[in-house]
């Protein structure tokens, strides 16, 4: 496999990419694939859609990917991804949680 594009992707998207080339994986890539199988919380299509919705809501792609990978359940958990350098309105936090809940229950 070679690098075609560099961008943050969800664990589910990584799993999809690795499974498309399963027979060509080296040992390290197989370990990464095993990780993705264990820790994928959504399928790749749901993950991509959720990242898109979070970006539309005003979340940077890097943070949107982290949120999709972990699916936080509270405002406090969402804040852990934002760090101290970002101030986010309560309304945006609730919007983020609403998007997460929509995909968690799907």
Image: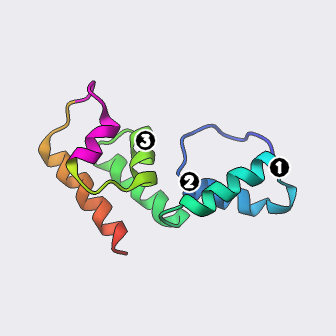
Q: CA distance from mark 1 to mark 2?
A: 18 Å
Q: Secondary structure at mark 3?
A: helix
Instruction: Bin the neighbour count of mark 2 within 10 Å (Cα to Cα): few under 14, some 14-19, many 20 and up.
Output: many
Nearer the camera: disc 1 or disc 2: 1
Name the spot of residue 36 as percent of width and height, x first: 61, 57
| Residue 50 marker | none
Q: Which residues are magenta?
A: 76-86
Tell me if residue 69 is in the magenta stretch. Answer: no
Position of residue 58 in the picture relative to residue 88 (left or right): right
In the rendered image, is residue 43 in sight?
yes
| Residue 27 marker | 1
Nearer the camera: disc 3 or disc 1: 1
- Which residue appears at 82% of the width and 53% of the height? 25
| Residue 61 marker | 3
Along the line of sight, which residue is nearer the eye, 86 or 84? 84
**What residue is disc 2 on?**
11
Instruction: Bin the neighbour count of mark 1 within 10 Å (Cα to Cα): few under 14, some 14-19, many 20 and up.
Output: few
Look at the image and tell me in which quarter the C terminus lies: bottom left
Position of residue 68 in the picture relative to residue 73 (left or right): right
For marks 3 and 2, the one nearer the N-term is: 2
Q: CA distance from mark 3 to mark 1?
A: 29 Å
């Amino acid at each position: 496999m070679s690098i075609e594009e560099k961008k943050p992707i969800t664990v589910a998207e990584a799993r999809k990419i690795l499974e498309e080339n399963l027979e060509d994986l080296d040992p390290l890539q197989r370990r990464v694939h095993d990780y993705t199988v264990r820790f994928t919380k959504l399928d790749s299509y749901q993950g991509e859609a959720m990242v898109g919705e979070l970006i539309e809501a005003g979340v940077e792609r890097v943070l949107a990917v982290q949120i999709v990978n972990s699916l936080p359940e509270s405002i406090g958990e969402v804040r852990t991804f934002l760090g101290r350098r970002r101030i986010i309105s309560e309304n945006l936090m609730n919007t983020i949680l609403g998007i997460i809940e929509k995909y968690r229950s799907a």
